[in-house]
Image (cartoon, rainbow, N blue to C red):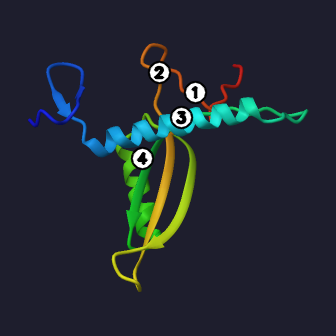
Amino acid sequence: MSTNLPETVAEGRVVLPAPPRVVDDLARDLTHAAAAVRAVSRGARCGGGDVSVAAYTAVVCTGRSAARALEEAAAWCRQAPEAEVHSLAWARVPGHRDDVFEYRATLAVSFPDHETGEHTGDTHHHAPR
C-alpha cells in the first residue's frame, strides 16, 4: 500500500486506501457546503420559506446512451438496497471525441444512521400506524 494515500478503515481488519480523488472530492464538497451556509446567513431572507443545506453522497453512473446510464443507475441501486435516492440529475456531456456524447445519471443518496437505522431526508415519511 502506498504511504501517500490516506486510509479508510472498514469494520474488522480490512484497511482500504482512499484514492486522492475521493479525498479531494470530499474536501471540495465540504467547502461548497460551507459556502452555501455562509450565503444563507448573509442573504436577506424572504418570509414564508426556509432554506436548508444537505450533504448527500453523489453516485455518478455513465453510459454511451441514456438507457445505458439509467441501467447502470438501476444496477447500482440493486447492489446498495439500503441506499435512499433523494434526487436524480441528468446530463449529456461531450465524450472522448467531438461527435460522441456521454450520458450521466447522478444520484444524490444517503444511507441509514448506524445507531438508529433511520434514514434522513425529505423522501422518508413514516405514516402513523
Residue designated by label 3: 55
- Coordinates of residue 34 in the picture (x, y in percent): 57, 32
Label 1: element kind: loop
- Coordinates of residue 100 in the picture (x, y in percent): 40, 81
Q: CA distance from mark 4 to mark 2?
A: 18 Å
Q: Amino acid at mark 1?
A: Thr
Q: Residues within 10 Å of mark 1 (few under 14, many from 20)?
A: some
Name the residue: 69% across, 19% down: 129
Residue designated by label 2: 113
Work out whether residue 81 can be spotted. no
Mark 1–mark 2 CB contact (< 8 Å): yes
Mark 3 and mark 4 lie on one chain; the one further toward the N terminus is: 3
Q: CA distance from mark 4 to mark 1?
A: 17 Å
Name the residue: 62% across, 31% down: 124
Residue designated by label 4: 77
Q: CA distance from mark 1 to mark 2?
A: 8 Å
Residue 51: numbered disc: none
Mark 4 and mark 1 lie on one chain; the one further toward the N terminus is: 4
Instruction: Choose mark 4 or mark 2, whichever is in front.
Output: 2
Mark 4 and mark 2 lie on one chain; the one further toward the N terminus is: 4
Q: Is residue 59 left or right of residue 16?
A: right
Label 2: element kind: loop
